[in-house]
Amino acid sequence: MKNQKVTNNIDWISILLYTVLVIMGWLTIYSASLPNQDISIFDLGQVSGKQFLFIVTSIPLIIVILTLDAKIYDKYAMIFYALGLLLLAGLFVLGKTIKGQTNWYSFGGFSMQPSEFAKIATSLVISKYLSDVQINLKIFKHQLIAFGIIALPVGLIMMQPDAGSALIFFSLMLALYREGLPGWYLATGAIAAALFILALLIQPVALIAFAAIIMIAAYFMTRRAFRNPILYAIIFVGITAFVFSVDYVFTNVLESHQKDRINVLFGKDVNMQAEGYNLNQAQIAIGSGGWLGKGYLEGTQTKGGFVPEQHTDYIFTTVGEEWGFAGSVTVICLFVGLLLRIIYRAERQKSKFSRTYGYCVASILFMHFLLNITMLIRLFPTVGVPLPFFSYGGSSLWAFTLMLFIFIKMDANQVNEW
């Protein structure tokens, strides 16, 4: 199929949502970083001016993506993936260590975080692998290969160490589920997460007793033909071992700052002027916005600089304080609208490659959005993940832009006709 004109069949709704989010993010960065109101939003000496430069340089990236033949992403997926792994591995030689993490390249005034771009490459390879008609995610061997594709970049990122970025890659399990991965994998992950949290809050013996009651009830509620006491016994033993291992993992495996973040979440043994300071100030800022907010550039918590890193991971606190509940809901609706739009367009694809990639994009954006918002309202431990299109940073903006527009190009080019 010959490559179509750039403007043919482009999803302008997705582009509109993207543009609105990027502009709103830029304006919010300006407010979050503004020491006084005499500085121009275009001042390249300020983060708002730098973000404007990142936005401007995203335009040629978009043009290139929409101009290139969409077939290259299928054809060269493995090359992109290998390059992504190489960039991640290269950090251990050439990377810059910041706050104990070696996850950035820095050359002169230019910095780049390769994990952001590795998400795109991993998504392309997962899509390439699953597009093979012989691949069936009901088969254990095929599941292992798919998990291995995700595990390679995760392992390199965990060695940096950067648990927040590594966690994002597990969102690709949602795309695998759409393409046939058995649902018990997701259920097991959700149960394990719930048990980990409960084991930190409840005495292990009481939690095991509760689990035993649930298992017995589930056994007798299951149809007789599907009752397997050995399977139930194995599951119960596994749950027991996992629950009793939580305290060891929390005490001896997790880093001190990771334990502090979990303690902050549960309000346990936390000094709110030390390890709990960031989250406490973020909640004060969001709560002070009320229904309609204090007004743009009028946030007292924001202007006072009480929330650290407010223009990056904590950018949503400025939205909550200055735009209030109404503004926060508006931003959330824009994100949800973009996610639903991507899923809708993905379901239109006849090509498994483009459909899977669309779900990978939606999954990654969803996980970033979910973790960033929930950590600010104390529903999840603090992790260093940016809010897509909102948080300050060239690497994240360029990566999210490339990721989204590759799919827009696939959809516009009707790769489902391959």
Image (spheres, rainbow, N blue to C red):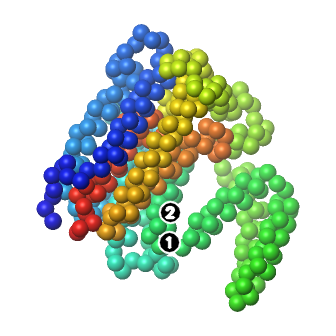
Q: Residue furthest top?
A: 38
Q: Is residue 172 above or below residue 328?
A: below
Packing grade of label 2 (10 A; few <14, some 14-19, many >=20) is some
Q: What residue type is labelled 2?
A: Met
Identity of the amino acid at label 1? Leu
Locate residue 414: give its quadrant. Answer: bottom left
Q: Do the residues labelled 2 and 1 touch (CB within 8 Å)?
A: yes
What percent of the width, then of the height, locates residue 53?
31, 29
For the C terminus, give its image quadrant.
bottom left
Say which mark, if any, is on residue 96. none
Q: Is residue 203 above or below residue 33?
A: below
Where is residue 238? Give x, y as percent.
Answer: 72, 71
Position of the N terminus by quadrant: bottom left
Label 1 environment density (alpha carbons within 10 Å; few <14, some 14–19, many ≥20): many
Q: Quadrant of residue 233?
A: bottom right
The spot of residue 256 in percent (x, y) is 67, 42
Residue 184 vs 101, above or below: the answer is: below
Query: Which residue is disc 2 drawn over?
Result: 173
Q: Disc 1 marks which residue?
A: 181
Residue 23 seen in the figure: yes
Secondary structure under the numbered disc 2 in the rendered image? helix
In the image, 49 versus 410, the foreground residue is 410
In the rendered structure, the answer to whether residue 207 lies left or right of residue 64 reads right
Which element carries disc 1, helix, strand or loop?
loop
